[in-house]
Image (cartoon, grey):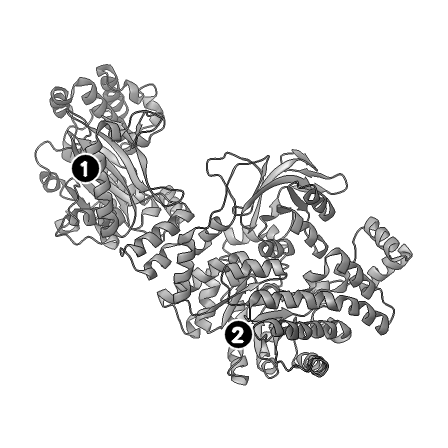
Amino acid sequence: MIEYVQIQRLGKDSDISSAQFGARASRLAKLLKLGLPVPLAYGVSVSAVSEIAAGRLPDVATLLGQFGDRAIVSVRSSPVKRAWGGPETLLNIGLNDALHAKLCHRLGEAAANALYCRFVQEYSINVARLDPEAFHGLDEDKCGTRDALQATLGIYSDEMEEAFPQNPEDQLLQVLRSMARSWGGTTARILRQAHGAPADAGLGLIVQRMALGLGVGESGAGVVQFVKPSTGEPAIRGRYMPKGQGRDALQPGKSALYITGDKRGRSLEDTNPKALAELQKYSEIARLGCHDALRFEFTIEGGKTWLLDAAPANRSPRAAVRIAVDLAEDGAISRKSAILRVEPANLQHLLHPQIDPEAKPKIFARGLAASPGAACGRIVFTASAAQACAAREEASILVRVETSPEDIRGMHSAKGVLTERGGMTSHAAVIARGLGVPCVVGASGITLNVKDKTLTTKDGEVFYEGDIITVDGTNGAAMAGDVSMVLPQVDGAFSTLMDWANEFRDIGIRANADSPTDARIAQQFGVDGIGLCRTEHMFFDEDRLTVMREMIFADDVSDRRAALDRLLPMQRSDFAELFAIMQGLPVCIRLFDPPLHEFLPHSREAMQELAEAMDLPVSQVISRRESLAEFNPMLGMRGVRLGITVPEIYDMQARAIFEATVEASAKGEPVVPEIMIPLVSAAREVELVKARIDAVATEVQNETGVQFTYRLGAMVETPRAALRAGDLAVNCAFLSFGTNDLTQMTYGLSRDDSGRFMSAYVNQGVFTEDPFHTLDIDGVGELLLLASERGRVAMPDIVLSICGEHGGDPATIEFCRAAGFNYVSCSPFRVPIARLAAAQSAVRGTNKTTEDLVVT
């Protein structure tokens, strides 16, 4: 027999931990310690349940004896964490023919029949493992008849070849053994592992006296919580079933009452206002004593209110923020605890529209959830069509095989983006996150025909340009038609939580911002500056694109300079506005990065239009594009390589930055611009670019008579740059790791194409997670650690940061804190997520040594 110490009474004097007896038992014990009315209950420990599953049985006679003669009990599962689930609760254990006869006199024959009939059916299905179809036709509404009860008992005896067990001890023993064994079954193990449970997850059980919810006087059962699930504000929500039991109030088809009265009819508030007032009082006691807003399962028996179970109240991500903040402000938890209560990734639900949870959309494609939020609009297949829709004030969804820089204006105009190809750091994903536009990339099973302007699903359904679809960038789905949504709402609780996060975080949070609009959004979210301004995105406005193309078609240096001189005031204006918006906070500007061919059109039709606009033969346009073509342009003449071979571009950008610095400093806070050289691999590259930028700085200072300072750094995107970081650091004030390209080059993976196989790789355990979504600590992370160590040996005060899309990932932020980085930079709409994740990391004290970070 199992030692009785492993089965403990839940009560004021018992010490019940979640690890030993499970979360539900631990919470019920807390309610009892708070003096709340919970029926007598005993917890069966996790270790005891394991022994029961192995065949070592408990002393059920002694256990049942604690409940008195002819007691009726229930058995509830109590996993170590509630989210892991568990076997279904079994009610009314102990019912037999003799007790049924007594209940007929006490409750009436119909109620007694229904209790006994339901128990036999549930025991048969969940313990004896009979097929539920065996009881077809014996629905709950028929269980109150004697014929239904006799039929149910007959089915059991026919199937099991023995009468239904009459000994309560035998019933309880078989229930405990069945629930213990089912926890170890394959299906249960797979289900709980899907909720993050380890393979050896523990289960406790609770044996509890039944409060029947039947009999004379006000009786019934229900569920109730005192916060609104959607917002977290005080409100009464729940259902109540008169003359009902346990889950009756929640089961479909049940004609339960609502807790409070409204136009839907009578309620518990009408029938028993005293019980409602008691529940409200109990809820507030439990809220402060258990440090959370709870949802109660309750029973009223003869006018007496009992609390059978308590769980965290249902809550949306928005409500979770409000509940945590209210608890802290009421002194129930600390501010640190409030910060830890909110999942950082869930903040995106507060910042973007989301699909209504009650909607039932028709999903025609699934892909990667590249940029959160939901949007609905008409299908368009080109950037120009998206712009035309915006001009008509029509919502559009830009659908592309994959996007390129020339699609940026269309992405600005569209309400959402859907691409056939691409990964989490593809062009579409990165730009959409920066714009705050919902985006799904790598949509499997769709085929686009841009010429015919059709989208065909894997089931053969065809969508045409102009058809309305909805994209869900939070869950990675594309849906037919206009799907109902829930609008975002940022309230005072959100702002309070962000203020508290700032109190505790010890790593800087900057934003990737390519335009004044991006910078304003970032400023609203409380950033510490701009960590990455991609200047090439400033050239895609129509007036600038024309000048940019003139520069590309220039025959000599003087013509190229003439075109760049026309771009200079445009860049200067952009930078001056960024500096003004950031009000003295640091702004890190990355010099021109992409290959020049990205600024030329791709299609024959577009090249014809360009030839007409520039008054050139179309053959010359085609020839120029072909001359710029490369076999692998992302590893070709781009970044610093372009800056060294065509130095006039960087000269113009440096002058624009410095002239904007003078202009902005004269109007407000002094500006110290940060200039970042992209795609460096060798120290000599930094030396060459630095020499030219220093010269431009001197020229501007001499021309304006204003002295200023600036900081020069390198963007570490190649493995060689990481390995030779010490050499680079000598001429740099900072090193910023562009983890998008660094991951791509370390793995030899195309970030635009990896979406085709990434799911298979993650599902089969090749990768634990998409390395473009969460930093690969073992591989790319080791390069970062080597680079930071070597960079600091050469320059102890060098500033280190991450400016790839990983900068908004909580796990990556924890890595950066432990590695001693100064800041991370991410898309503007991920700034709140990063701020909260940084605070949580600091609160948990996860400041590990670098030796802890890499698995060797």
Percent position of residue 354, x then y: 51, 44
Q: Which amino acid does label 1 sit on?
A: Trp
Q: How crowded is mark 2: few (under 14 residues within 10 Å), some or many (20 or more)?
A: many
Residue placed at 35% from the left, 43% from the top? 314
Distance Cα–Cα, label 2 vs label 1 = 58 Å
In the picture provided, is 174 more to the left or to the right than 189? left
The quarter holding residue 316 reads: top left
Question: Residue 358 at x, y = what percent?
Answer: 46, 35
Extreme residue toward the right, this view: 617
The residue lying furthest to the front in this view is: 667
Question: For this rendering, which residue is in front, 418 or 59?
Answer: 418
For residue 324, above or below residue 127: below
Counting from the top left corner in percent of width and height, residue 492 is at 41, 53
The front one of 487 and 774 is 487
Marks 2 & 1, CB-CB < 8 Å contact: no
Above or below residue 203? Residue 156 is above
Q: Give amino acid for label 2.
A: Leu
Left or right: 565 as drawn, with respect to 784: right
**Horizontal side, residue 652 vs residue 672: left or right:** right
Residue holding disc 2: 800
- Residue nearest the observer in this picture, 177 or 813: 813
What SS does tag 2 mark? strand
Horizontal and vertical percent for residue 43? 19, 46
**Residue 172 sits in which quadrant?**
top left
Q: In this view, does 506 lie above or below 516?
A: below
Is residue 300 in sight in this rendering? yes
Residue where numbered disc 1 is placed: 306
Which of the 4 quarters of the picture holds residue 600?
A: bottom right
**Disc assigned to residue 232:** none
Sooner in the amino-acid sequence: mark 2 or mark 1: 1
What crowding class fits label 1: few (fewer than 14 Cα within 10 Å), some (14-19), or many (20 or more)?
many
Instruction: Identify the residue at image location x=50%, y=74%.
Output: 785
